[in-house]
Amino acid sequence: MNYVDSLKSVFADALKSAEDLSTLDELRLAYMGKKGLVKNLFENLKSTSSEIRGAKAKELNEFKEYVEAELMRAESDLKHRENNLRIQDEWQDISLPSSIQQQGSLHPLTRIERHCIEVLGMMGFKLAEGPEIEDAFHNFDALNISENHPARDMQDTFWLEKELLLRSHTSTIQIRTLQEQKDLPIRIISPGRVYRNESVDATHLAYFHQFEGLWVDEGVKFSHLKGTVDFIIKNTFGDGWDIRYKPKFYPYTEPSVGVDVREKGKNGKWITVLGAGMVHPNVFRMTGHDPKKVSGFAFGLGTSRMVSMAHGVTDMKSLYLGDLRVHQRLARKAYKA
Ligand code: DAH
């Protein structure tokens, strides 16, 4: 092997082991730098005899060109390789569909409340609201449930300080509306949460949702009550349900009824979805209305129960526990209207 070839072969070995651009730079410096090998070899030429200097210089030039060309080639190869690695690393398939977004939805209770507000709104009912912390007058006395009336025991109440309580029903809104409004007609609906001091177990909680309705005017009859209640039930459950009126007792209505529904043709159990009746004369008297001039009906509808019936939720408690599986399943279902 001649002199140049052996230089080339040493360089070629060093080049092979330069696997990244920074080692390549070191190699370039070692060969082509100011204090590099090539410079050195040219320096050494000065001390060789003049006969061979020309030939040696030619060889050295050939080696220098070789080194320069090889360094350039290796640099471009390495750049290419590093680019490819980066592309592999950062590559993204922009044609892939994006990750699935969870779509939120309203709580089933909110949906049925809004549904009922819409249905009753078509009949001219307006929304009314009231506090969840009440006094005994609005929750009991003005509803003709006097202090020693056994009906107070029917609704086990959470009592707070200073004769206040957590409302046990939305019928309090009837009283507040009748006290405030003397112009006729009075037509209000009021959905909300109510509380009962029940022992909490697998299927019972100490609160649930109700929906109160009140229509007062001159000449309101039981047939108006029936027409309104039938309208709500048909618009919520559809035509495939039987409706049954049965006598019941509420101190604030006379006569009073319970309304049951059952899926047509299934012969299943009747389930009570609301209580209703013609507003008791004492309620009118206690709120400043003349029962000889006005009449009206009221109803209280169990919204939690309606949701569980409309959707076949057997455990009502699951509506309140924020279990997404229950809510997602119900979110897809629509009410009839
Ligand atoms: N307040 C009753 C309850 O919570 C429901 C009810 C019955 C409301 C008759 C009424 C009514 O307005 O007239 O069970």
Image: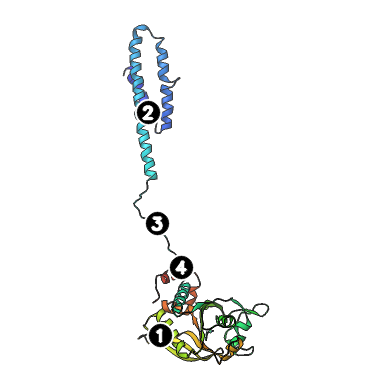
Q: Residue at (39%, 31%) from the top-left corner?
A: 18
Q: Which amino acid does label 2 sit on?
A: Leu
Q: Earlier in the sequence, mark 4 or mark 3?
A: 3
Q: Quadrant of residue 112?
A: bottom left
Q: What residue type is labelled 3?
A: Ser
Q: Earlier in the sequence, mark 3 or mark 1?
A: 3
Q: How far apart are marks 3 and 1 (CA)?
A: 43 Å
Residue identified by numbered label 4: 324
- Dot 4 beta carbon under 8 Å from ligand 1: no
In the rendering, at what x and y percent does residue 107 appear? 47, 70
Q: Which quarter of the figure is the C terminus placed in?
A: bottom left
Which numbered tag is attached to residue 99?
A: 3
In the rendering, at what x and y percent does residue 146 appear? 62, 89
Q: Distance between the residues labelled 4 and 1?
A: 28 Å
Q: Which class describes the residues within 10 Å of circle 3: few (<14), some (14-19), or many (20+)?
A: few
In this picture, residue 260 sits left or right of residue 159: left
Residue identified by numbered label 2: 15
